[in-house]
């Protein structure tokens, strides 16, 4: 195993994956749980979705959430910079 790499087994939508990365096992588990939660919520709304479509829609929903937060962060940074200039 690479130095600095942590491994953890997680369950996402009934599939077990081994994740490896430099972040803590707890964080990897938390991120996997978030993806699992989002996939299950989407599937509950439309149980006819196939796994690939479900995964793509989950990724798009998470990307939208990320983009919303990134935009809000940029707005806050701009406001702080403006305030610092005043």
Image: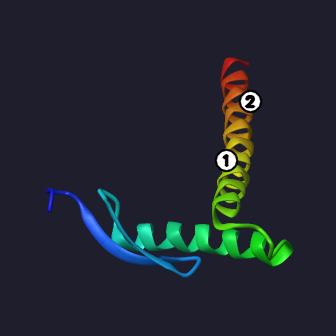
Mark 1 / mark 2, whichever is N-terminal: 1
Say which mark, if any, is on residue 7. none
Q: CA distance from mark 1 to mark 2?
A: 24 Å
Residue occupying image coordinates x 64% and y 67%: 51
Residue 37 sits above or below residue 66 on the image = below
Image-quadrant location for residue 55: bottom right
Q: Position of residue 18 (x, y in %)?
A: 35, 71
Look at the numbered discs 1 and 2 and tell me whether their residues touch, using CB distance below 8 Å: no
20 and 66: which is toward the camera: 20
Q: Report the disc number at residue 63.
A: 1
- In front: 72, or 45? 45
Q: Would residue 41 be found to the left or right of residue 20 on screen?
A: right
Residue extending farthest top: 85
Task: Give the SS element for disc 1.
Answer: helix
Rendered residue at 80%/78% (across/down): 44
Where's residue 75, x and y in %? 74, 33
Judge depth for marks 1 and 2 and give the one in front. Answer: 1
Label 2, residues with CA under 10 Å away: few <14, some 14-19, many ≥20:
few
Q: How many marks?
A: 2
Q: Where is residue 22 drawn, in percent x and y?
A: 29, 56
Q: Which residue is mark 2?
A: 79
Task: Label 2, secondary structure: give it.
Answer: helix
Instruction: Name the image quarter holding residue 72.
Output: top right
Q: Nearer the viewer, residue 31 or 73?
A: 31
- 49 relative to 65, above or below: below
**Residue ID at (69%, 68%):** 38
What is the quadrant of the N terminus in the image? bottom left
């Amino acid at each position: 195993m690479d130095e600095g790499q942590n491994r953890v087994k997680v369950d996402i939508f009934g599939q077990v994956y081994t994740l490896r990365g430099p972040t803590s096992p707890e964080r990897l588990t938390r991120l996997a749980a978030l993806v699992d939660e989002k996939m299950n919520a989407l599937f509950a709304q439309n149980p006819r979705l196939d796994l690939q479509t479900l995964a793509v829609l989950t990724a798009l929903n998470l990307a939208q959430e990320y983009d919303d937060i990134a935009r809000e962060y940029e707005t806050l940074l701009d406001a702080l910079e403006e305030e610092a200039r005043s």
